[in-house]
């Protein structure tokens, strides 16, 4: 019986599928030795930027679901949500037996530790769950929460995803992020002190941001913080969000597809190859998306990024802004630490 031989056409080390960047799928395959998929669930949390803890109104791009439009329904118990999500994913990958539970909506550390413990450990002990990913804000990690996450990290495979979106404070004010870049840096330091893997969430296409500004966000988080992953997201303009007003008043220009593809390739080229790329575009429900409508064809976007990297004959890290042998040296204000 003939065996299919996979021919690799590029020299990128962190790929076995001819991808020219370090995909989340490749990372999980290497770590667990099998295909893993991530199941988005709604942990029932709120956001300190909505409930008045730090501000009200929330980020202007955020939807009523807390930017978790594909997570399960919070009215269901967490184990039920998990099972529904697994059943849905099995329609595409019927043979997968192991899963990452992804606490996606809102701010998933915005509660006392006893509540966090109850909700997280409902799912990590479910059959097939090999780890959890927790999306949160950097201003919502008090010492007792960090201590609990450190405890979890000793027992389970976990990631903490920090919603930074941009390093630019002027943009932060426009989108009502309500936390500073310094707060983000402090949160990364505290998580990494316990060896907890950190993924930084960035958004391309925020109001007023230029190509250079979006490149600067990627470069700064790499140089300033010891992160293990980056999630690059296209700005989706959604119905019933405050950002829609900016768009109608001419203060927001949506990115074109070719513009976005070129930008992402530029960003990948400066990201060190060991950093896991959790995502380079995003999904949005068709019925609530205002634009860009080209983003609905996700696979076309991903293929265009692959083709552009191939056309350039480049790959993630080819212009790595950390020098060789110094990939774990963090630079702050010109000082090394």
Image (tube, grey):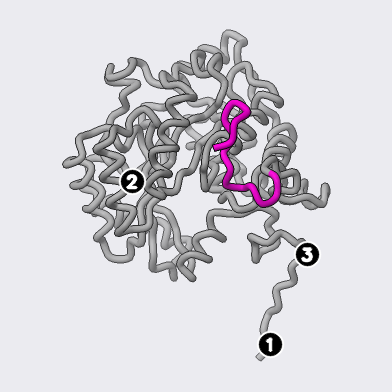
What residue is pinned by disc 1?
A: 2
258 in relation to 19, above or below = above
Viewer can see residue 234: no
| Chain part drawn in magenta | 323-337
52 in relation to 115, above or below = above
Write the residue at 29% across / 32% down.
142
Residue 116 spot, x, y in % from top left? 23, 42
Q: Residues within 10 Å of mark 1 (few under 14, many from 20)?
A: few
Q: Residues within 10 Å of mark 2 (few under 14, many from 20)?
A: many
Q: In 3D space, how far apart are the residues under numbered discs 2 and 1 (Cα atoms)?
A: 42 Å
What residue is pinned by disc 3?
A: 9
Q: Is residue 182 left or right of residue 302?
A: left
Q: Nearer the viewer, residue 230 or 180?
A: 180
Tag 1 or tag 2, which sits nearer the N-term? 1
What element does badge 2 sit on? Answer: strand
What residue is pinned by disc 2?
A: 41
What element does badge 3 sit on? Answer: loop
What element does badge 1 sit on? Answer: loop
Residue 103 spot, x, y in % from top left? 34, 44
Write the residue at 58% across / 43% down.
329
Q: Nearer the viewer, residue 292 or 10?
A: 10
Q: Which image quadrant for residue 55? A: top left
Q: In 3D space, how far apart are the residues under numbered discs 2 and 3 (Cα atoms)?
A: 38 Å
299 in relation to 60, above or below = below
Viewer can see residue 161: yes
Q: In 3D space, how far apart are the residues under numbered discs 1 and 3 (Cα atoms)?
A: 21 Å
- Quarter holding the N terminus is bottom right
Q: Are marks 2 and 3 in contact (CB under 8 Å)?
A: no
The dominant secondary structure in magenta is: loop
């Amino acid at each position: 019986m003939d065996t299919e031989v996979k021919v690799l056409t590029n020299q990128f080390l962190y790929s076995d599928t001819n991808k020219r960047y370090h995909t989340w799928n490749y990372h999980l395959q290497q770590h667990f030795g099998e295909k893993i998929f991530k199941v988005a669930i709604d942990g029932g949390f709120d956001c300190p930027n909505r409930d008045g803890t730090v501000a009200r109104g929330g980020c202007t791009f955020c939807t009523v679901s807390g930017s978790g439009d594909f997570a399960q329904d919070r009215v269901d118990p967490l184990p039920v949500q998990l099972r529904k999500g697994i059943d849905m994913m099995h329609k595409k990958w019927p043979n997968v037996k192991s899963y990452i539970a992804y606490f996606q909506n809102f701010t998933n550390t915005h509660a006392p530790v006893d509540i966090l413990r109850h909700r997280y450990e409902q799912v990590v002990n479910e059959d097939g769950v090999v780890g959890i990913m927790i999306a949160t804000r950097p201003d919502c990690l008090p010492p007792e929460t960090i201590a609990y996450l450190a405890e979890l990290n000793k027992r389970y495979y976990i990631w903490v995803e920090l919603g930074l979106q941009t390093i630019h404070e002027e943009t932060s004010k426009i989108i009502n992020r309500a936390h500073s870049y310094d707060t983000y840096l402090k949160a990364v330091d505290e998580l990494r002190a316990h060896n907890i893997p950190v993924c930084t969430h960035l958004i391309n296409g925020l109001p007023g941001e230029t190509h250079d500004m979006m490149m600067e966000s990627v470069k700064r988080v790499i140089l300033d913080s010891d992160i293990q992953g980056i999630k690059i997201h296209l700005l989706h303009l959604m119905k019933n969000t405050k950002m829609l007003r900016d768009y109608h008043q001419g203060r927001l220009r949506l990115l074109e597809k070719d513009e976005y593809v070129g930008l992402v390739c530029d960003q990948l080229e400066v990201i060190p190859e060991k950093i896991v790329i959790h995502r380079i575009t995003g999904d949005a429900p068709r019925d609530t998306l205002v634009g860009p409508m080209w983003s609905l064809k996700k696979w076309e976007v991903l293929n265009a990024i692959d083709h552009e990297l191939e056309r350039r004959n480049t790959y993630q890290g080819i212009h790595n802004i950390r020098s060789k042998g110094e990939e774990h040296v963090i630079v702050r204000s010109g000082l090394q630490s």
